[in-house]
Amino acid sequence: MSEQPSAPVLTPALTPAPVPAASPRARWWTILLGLLLLAAGGVAVHDLLVVRGTIHTDQLLTPVYDWIADVTYADWVLPAAIGCALVALILLVATLRPRARTHLSFGEDAALYARPVDVARMSTAAARQAGGVLRASTVATRKRITVTATTAAGDQAERNAVSAAVSEQVGHLAAMLDPEPAVVVKIVASTPGGDRR
């Protein structure tokens, strides 16, 4: 009796995760403009209710209508129009500018991203695994990982060896990031009575 060929196992293709990015630059302008339009709509509804006789009070927009009816050309109109055009241009640029990336990706087309603070924590943990390091702290940006390591090494040769070990440990992590940030290692001598291990 011949065996039936097994059906091929289909594995779904991994699609890259969307790149995390900061809020659009036009977000707060949009919120402010929306609040202004809501206020204007509230005033318009108020005046409509006054006209229909639902509420008995003065219209709020009547002075505005009177002012618009009496407006004539003045010297300030041209500068005001230019100012409005500049504000509109600023809003347009803020809307069209791409959002700033907030995370670092692990490899090209990666499905995994990390914040710079997470990369700093991983770099600190990696630096502590290097021999001769008592303490370590890290500041990470998209372009650079700066590790400050404290060591009890006495002479410069030993400190250079510790620096090389830290660079190697953190360099493995940096090599996984795209684009790969530069690794800067600063060695600080331990003070008397400091940590020992």
Image: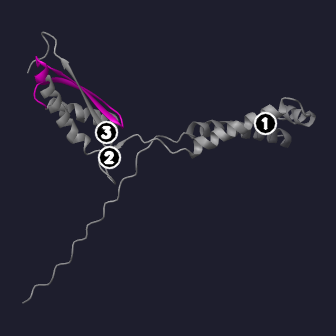
161 w.r.t. 88: above or below: above
Cα distance in 3D space between marks 1 and 3: 47 Å
In the rendered image, which quarter contains the C terminus?
top left
Q: Are marks 1 and 3 in contact (CB under 8 Å)?
A: no
- In the image, taking residue 157 as reference, residue 34 lies left or right, namely right
Question: Quick one: SS at disc 2?
Answer: loop
The residue drawn where x is 14% and y is 84% is 4
Residue position marked by numbered label 2 in the rendering: 178
Residue type, label 1: Ala
User: Could you tell me residue 52's position as x and y percent?
Assistant: 84, 43
Residue position marked by numbered label 1 in the rendering: 81
Cα distance in 3D space between marks 2 and 1: 46 Å
- Which range is magenta? 130-158
Residue type, label 3: Pro
Task: Using the rendered view, name the quadrant where residue 42 is placed.
Answer: top right
Residue position marked by numbered label 3 in the rendering: 181
In this orientation, does residue 170 appear? yes
User: Could you tell me residue 70's position as x and y percent?
Assistant: 93, 33
> Which mark identifies residue 193?
none
- In the image, taking residue 34 as reference, residue 15 lies left or right, namely left
User: Could you tell me residue 156's position as x and y percent?
Assistant: 14, 20
Tell which circle, 2 or 1, labels the residue nearer the N-terminal end: 1
Residue type, label 2: Asp
Mark 2 against mark 1, which lies toward the viewer? 2
108 w.r.t. 143: above or below: below
The residue drawn where x is 87% and y is 31% is 63
Mark 1 against mark 3, which lies toward the viewer? 3
